[in-house]
Amino acid sequence: VQLQASGGGKVRPGGYLRLSCAAVGSIFSIKAVAWYRQAPGKQRELVAAISKTGSTNYADSVKGRFTISRDNAKNTVYLQMNTLKPEDTAVYYCNAGDQKYVSGNFYYIGGDYWGQGTQVTVSS
């Protein structure tokens, strides 16, 4: 399975970008998908995740600014990033994996399928 991430770039604070993660094959129809990011010198962190049926969750740092969505027919997952901040600067990776529900809440467990990463730089 191959995941291809794209859409990164350099924007000014307050700007926006839309990342895309395209899968070769129909894996997204059977997997949850997430976006992670890793800034220099920091651990990789989960940014946003979407379940097979469209439930979502977000890191507190991006709530209200980022939106994850999926188009299973196109085997693509998107991350719309608005009101970008310098601290959003990182390499962003998509990941396909497993999910669970606890008390009706969606949680992303993770998986072995990774995209190659796309650089997002927010700077004036």
Image (tube, rainbow, N blue to C red):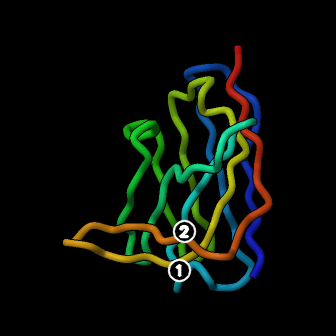
Name the residue nearer the viewer: 39 or 80. 39
Give the residue at the far top of this rendering.
124
User: Residue 121 location, x and y as percent?
Assistant: 73, 31
Residue beneath the point at 38% across and 67% down: 107
Residue 108, image quadrant: bottom left
Amino acid found under the numbered disc labelled 1: Lys
Say which mark, if any, is on residue 31. 1
Residue 26, image quadrant: bottom right
Residue beneath the point at 53% across and 80% down: 31
What quarter of the picture does the N terminus occupy?
bottom right
Name the residue nearer the viewer: 33 or 67. 33
Marks 1 and 2 in Cβ contact (< 8 Å): yes
Give the residue at the far left of this rendering.
103
Q: Which class describes the residues within 10 Å of circle 1: few (<14), some (14-19), or many (20+)?
A: some
Amino acid found under the numbered disc labelled 2: Val
Residue topped by disc 2: 33
Q: Is residue 19 above or below residue 116?
A: above
Say which mark, if any, is on residue 9. none
